[in-house]
Amino acid sequence: MAPAKSGHQVCSCCGHSAGDGCPHPQPGQSHRCFSTPQDQGPGISSYADDPTKAGTSLKVCLDKAMTVIPAKQQKETPTYLGATAGMRLLREQNSTKADQVLAEVSKAIQEYSVDFRGARVLTGNDEGSFGWITVNYLLQTLIKFSFTGEWIHLPAADTVGALDLGGASTQIAFFPGRTIEDNSTQALFKLYGSNYSIYTHSYLCYGQNQVLKKLIASLREDNVTSISHPCYPKGYQMNITTASLYDSPCIPAPSTSAQNKTLTVVGMGMPAKCRSAIQQLFNFTACRPNKTCGFNGVYQPPERGQFYAFSGYYSVFHFLNLTSGQPLSTVNTTIWDFCYKNWKELQEEFPGQDRTYLRNYCAAGFYILTILMQGYKFDNQTWQNIHFRQQVANTDVGWSLGYMLNLTNMIPAEVPSKAKGQKFVFWIITMLIVGLLLALVLWSIVALTYQRQFANYETIL
Ligand SMILES: Nc1ncnc2c1ncn2[C@@H]1O[C@H](COP(=O)(O)OP(=O)(O)O)[C@@H](O)[C@H]1O
């Protein structure tokens, strides 16, 4: 693998914050900051209302990043800003506002002494592809350094697929090992001299936060201000306004709700109803004749190989203690049992847990099962091929590292010709071992000869 350039650190600020701030990587690693407020609350729409807020919250994250970049290296640290589905949605809604947000964050970064190289909204396919690059780079499934000091290409079939669940969109990317029949879902890269043809698709509006909002909207009945929510725990109740429910292009407002109203959402804790309400948010039957599909009529070749599921997939399954390769039956019963717990029990059992996440885990658990099994068509057997992970090789998995590797050309298009330094070290070590062995053999011969002569001498005496 191409080593990270020493001292270079990249901060890519993006989508929906989990509120967990900035991790503290070592110099040379990518540094991902979160700059969007939690979408459980006002979401990216609050930046649309006041784009300067985007700059302000970015500064909080950049301040943290600057504490881990050695002062001497700050000036030469390439810094990129990548925005994802939250900004894609805002651009759809109001492109002027989206441009203002990008301008504000660019202005904020320029106040820091880093080598700022631009802000961009990634396409859904980019987001999926960069996640795939990240995970395969970290797992070293593209090339590996052999004992003899050569770089060896690994077969593309050994790469793993990437499953990313964000707040506003969700991505799938994998090497299908067959022709990709829809060009819009194909990503072609040349990495280390090998060509890869990857299937990738991003489902906009199928990120966790947008889906959970869509679920509430789907449960709403005309002219009724109370919503019975089968996935929220019994005993839980909250108020939301129709303005906040219908604030994104993912959830079109019904023509009847022109005026802003307050709705009361009441938890029922009914897992069977919850699962079926979630299934209603997908179309599993639409697909062009003789094609295989994911959902909503989107072409998808049959999934193949091992998959790493990260971001939202990991957060939810980690909370539910389901990241150790549990069989599907255990996953099902765990989610089912969790959904039966009432709000009082949940708060007592998980006192330190964020309340918003806590009330959402039942719906999020069923959402993950539904998208993986009925959406992407994993089955009882292939379920075991999904690995729920936050990190690989001590590094967070997500699109941002792949984005940085791509922009800084840290994965060369051609295989590194000769690892001269490392090859030299290999030969030195080999010579040392051979030399040591020779010395050992010589020493044994000399020792044996002396022993024999000494024995003869003793016999003569
Ligand atoms: N501890 C957590 N428990 C449950 N959900 C979480 C947790 N942390 C993050 N999430 C959710 O996971 C999803 C993905 O988060 P993130 O990777 O930050 O989103 P994005 O890709 O939109 O930036 C979001 O819906 C977020 O709310």
Image: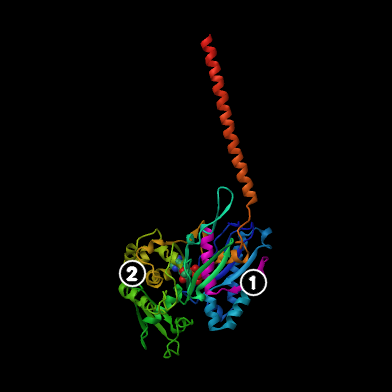
Judging from the image, the colouring scheme is: rainbow
| Residue 118 tag number | 1
In the rendered image, the vertical position of residue 72 relative to residue 109, given as above or below: above
In the rendered image, the vertical position of residue 84 relative to residue 426, given as above or below: below
Mark 1: secondary structure: strand
Q: Residue at x 41, y 64 (%)?
A: 317
In the rendered image, the vertical position of residue 197 relative to residue 442, given as above or below: below
Circle 2 residue: 339
Residue 66 is situated, as x and y percent measured from the top left of the image, at 62, 62
Residue 444 is situated, as x and y percent measured from the top left of the image, at 55, 27
Residue 42 is situated, as x and y percent measured from the top left of the image, at 49, 77
Mark 2: secondary structure: helix
Q: Amino acid at mark 1?
A: Gly
Q: Is disc 2 surrounded by few (<14), some (14 to 19) or many (20+) residues within 10 Å?
A: many
Residue 230 is at least partly visible in this image: no
Query: The magenta stretch spans which residues?
Result: 109-138
Q: Is residue 134 magenta?
A: yes
Quadrant of the snapshot with the N terminus = bottom right
Evaluate if marks 1 and 2 touch, with contact meaning CB atoms under 8 Å apart. no
Residue 405 is situated, as x and y percent measured from the top left of the image, at 59, 63
